[in-house]
Amino acid sequence: DNFHQPRSMSHANVNVSELFAEYEADFHRLLAEADEFLAASCASAAALGKADRRLTEADQAVKQMDLEVRALPPEARQKLQEKIKGFKASVSERRKQKEARNREVLLGDASASVLGKSADEHGRAEDMNQSMMDASRKLQEAKRTVLDSEQIGLDVMGDLRLQRETIERSRDNMGKVGQNYSMAGKTLEGMLARADQNRRMVCLI
């Protein structure tokens, strides 16, 4: 099974909305493929592994969409951010389904292997299954921690972008204020010159 990657978005003339649409198409394709593997009547560990890879790729597509949305003006973000929230929920739900199917496969394999064995062997097999499920749970927790860290990084990037825009606007405003002061100074100089000229004329009279 080849590991699919979302399509490259390196076209310089593609705008944000087009990039978002392409990532969204990738997301729906990957989610549909994951559903096929999860819905198999006799899902194997290999099929569940393929489903997990599709879900990982789908999650990456969602992250790319999130980055594109953060580049939009604030008034254009809300609707797309709601859509991204739904995409994340879809991936999370599929991961839960995958974990449930994975437990079924593990328990099914264990049940088949312990038929005809002694009670001691049955107990060891159950312990092994429990250890495997514990390891799987810890792995998922580690993945969630990594994803949370990535989300924090995305939030920081968004905040920095907004701060940069605020600084640039402040700089433009300061330039305009400086121009106004310069014009006012020239006007005052002209008024003083005319007053001096009038005073001299009065003295001559």
Image (tube, grey):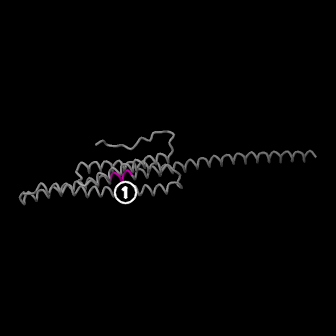
- Viewer-proximal residue, 190 or 33? 33
Magenta span contains residue 148: yes
- Viewer-proximal residue, 110 or 157? 110
When asked about the image quadrant of residue 113, the answer is bottom left
* Region rendered in magenta: 145-150
**Residue at the spot 87% in from the left edge and 47% down from the top edge:** 198
Query: Circle 1: is it few (<14), some (14-19), or many (20+) Cα within 10 Å?
Result: some
Q: Is residue 120 above or below residue 187?
A: below
**Residue at the spot 26% in from the left edge and 58% down from the top edge:** 100
Residue 115, image x, y percentages: 9, 57
Give the SS element for disc 1.
helix
Looking at the image, residue 127 sits to the left or right of residue 7; the answer is left
Residue 26, image x, y percentages: 40, 47
Residue 133, image x, y percentages: 21, 56
Q: Is residue 183 above or below residue 110?
A: above
Report which residue position mark 1 lands on: 90
